[in-house]
Amino acid sequence: MASSCNRQYFLNPRLSLRLVTLLWTVTWTVSATERAADIYLRGEVGGNVTFHCPVDKTRTVTFFYFQIQDEFVNGYYRTKDIVRSVWENTRVDRDETAVHMYGLNISHSGKYECIIQYVDSPRINEAFIELSVTANYSKPTVTTFCDGENLSCLVTCSSHGGYPKAKMIWNGPMSENTTNHMLTIVNSSEVPNPVTMMFNSSSTANFNCSNGQQTGLSCSVGDVTSDVFSVCAPKVPPVVSSVIVGFACVVPFVLLLGLLLYCKCKKRHRGEATLNGKTVNGGDEEAIGLSAI
Ligand SMILES: *[C@@H]1O[C@H](CO)[C@@H](O)[C@H](O)[C@H]1NC(C)=O
Ligand SMILES: *[C@@H]1O[C@H](CO)[C@@H](O)[C@H](O)[C@H]1NC(C)=O
Ligand SMILES: *[C@@H]1O[C@H](CO)[C@@H](O)[C@H](O)[C@H]1NC(C)=O
Ligand SMILES: *[C@@H]1O[C@H](CO)[C@@H](O)[C@H](O)[C@H]1NC(C)=O
Ligand SMILES: *[C@@H]1O[C@H](CO)[C@@H](O)[C@H](O)[C@H]1NC(C)=O
Ligand SMILES: *[C@@H]1O[C@H](CO)[C@@H](O)[C@H](O)[C@H]1NC(C)=O
Ligand SMILES: *[C@@H]1O[C@H](CO)[C@@H](O)[C@H](O)[C@H]1NC(C)=O
Ligand SMILES: *[C@@H]1O[C@H](CO)[C@@H](O)[C@H](O)[C@H]1NC(C)=O
């Protein structure tokens, strides 16, 4: 192992950092590390980010490396090559003192540390860059199942592949309180995928149809919202129903009236026939009935 010396130096960056620090705190009694303000960075699953470590461009860098919780990510040493393995999905940009990270996934989230030393000073400069990787939830899909009489409808909204964990929310056209009166949440869940750590979020709600059709509904998770949907059969509008009711009342009434008139006529003709002393048969009655009208 010819390279073991080099490797040793970078094997445990923290350890080597501590040694360097210790050495210089002994000789110089001042604090030998300088910590810059934290930097926050956002990335998306599958995307790329660039960590720009705060570096003084006017000075020459002795070494620079990037680590997360004592795990070496990538870096360089001015006069040597780094032999130890670096994260496959990273590239160091020496000119910019930056680290490019590709193909992000949730597990890349965390607090990274830049460690920089300049040629002209033994001081160790630290900076923290916090990366949060997120994933957009898919547009929620809505499935509706109504019972036979359309007295109530069960609606499920589901979305997958999002991060961080987020609840499915129901949106109604009116105030939150009204929405809560219209529906009862049966269950909801946020299930993580053990490998990708991304969540599937869903919610099932029961809608009471006693108030008729409910329109302008939607559900949301994270920043995404479903298509607008309606549930329950529309209530028969009052105008239409009164026409139907009216029609339903009038028809038997007309029939009854007709029957009543018919009977009255028949009675009167029968009376006339008796008065005239005629024997009445079916055919005659018909003829008399007709002529009497
Ligand atoms: C990430 O970087 C790779 C390699 O440079 C590139 O092919 C890809 O298009 C980049 N992806 C995004 C989302 O920018
Ligand atoms: C995720 O959502 C944000 C904001 O809605 C959008 O700007 C971005 O392009 C989306 N990313 C992907 C990969 O669709
Ligand atoms: C219930 O609603 C469905 C769809 O909206 C409709 O096809 C069905 O006829 C309705 N049933 C009753 C009993 O109203
Ligand atoms: C909703 O109900 C709560 C208590 O039940 C009340 O305090 C609140 O003001 C109501 N909000 C609206 C928008 O009506
Ligand atoms: C929620 O309830 C619905 C209807 O009872 C059921 O089909 C679904 O499997 C339930 N989902 C969960 C995550 O329990
Ligand atoms: C999440 O949803 C996707 C798409 O519907 C499905 O293929 C996957 O099995 C679900 N994962 C979990 C953990 O439920
Ligand atoms: C995330 O990326 C790392 C490489 O940096 C890889 O080892 C790991 O398997 C990836 N995880 C997932 C869930 O894709
Ligand atoms: C639906 O609402 C009506 C009136 O608000 C109520 O009488 C009925 O019990 C409710 N049905 C269910 C299944 O909750």
Image (cartoon, rainbow, N blue to C red):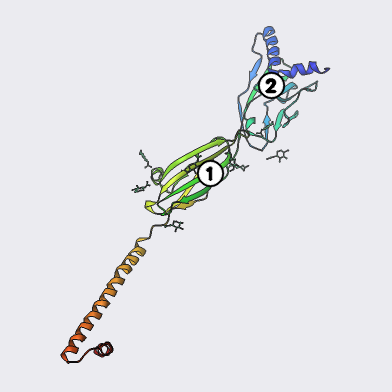
Ligand number 6: quarter of image = top right
Q: Which amino acid, mark 2?
A: Ile
Total numbered badges shown on the rendered structure: 2
- Asked if residue 119 can be seen in this view, the reply is no
Near mark 2 (Cα within 10 A), the count class, few <14, some 14-19 or many ≥20, is many
The residue closer to the viewer here, 74 or 256, is 256
Q: Nearer the viewer, residue 264 or 45?
A: 264
Residue at (39% x, 57% y) in the render? 235
Q: Residue at x 70, y 18 (%)?
A: 13
233, above or below 71, in the image: below
Residue 158 circle label: 1
Position in image of residue 2 (x %, y %)? 84, 17
Which of the 4 image quadrants contains residue 36? top right
- Quadrant assignment for the N terminus: top right
In the picture of the structure, the residue carrying the numbered disc 2 is 115
Asked if 35 appears above or below 254 in the picture, the reply is above
Q: Residues within 10 Å of mark 1 (few under 14, many from 20)?
A: many
Mark 2 close to ligand 7, CB under 8 Å: no
Does 275 sit above or below residue 82? Answer: below
Q: Which mark is residue 30?
A: none
* Helix, strand or loop for disc 2: strand
Callout 1: helix, strand or loop?
strand
Q: Between marks 2 and 1, how big is the CA–CA gap?
A: 44 Å
Q: Residue furthest left?
A: 275
Residue 185 occupies quadrant:
top left
**Would you say the beta carbon of the disc 1 residue lies within 8 angstroms of ligand 6?**
yes
Pair 2/1: label in front: 1
Give me the residue at 63% from left, 30% from top: 107
Residue 130 image position (x, y, % from top left) = 61, 28
In the rendering, at what x and y percent does residue 92 appear? 74, 29
Q: Residue at x 74, y 19 (%)?
A: 10
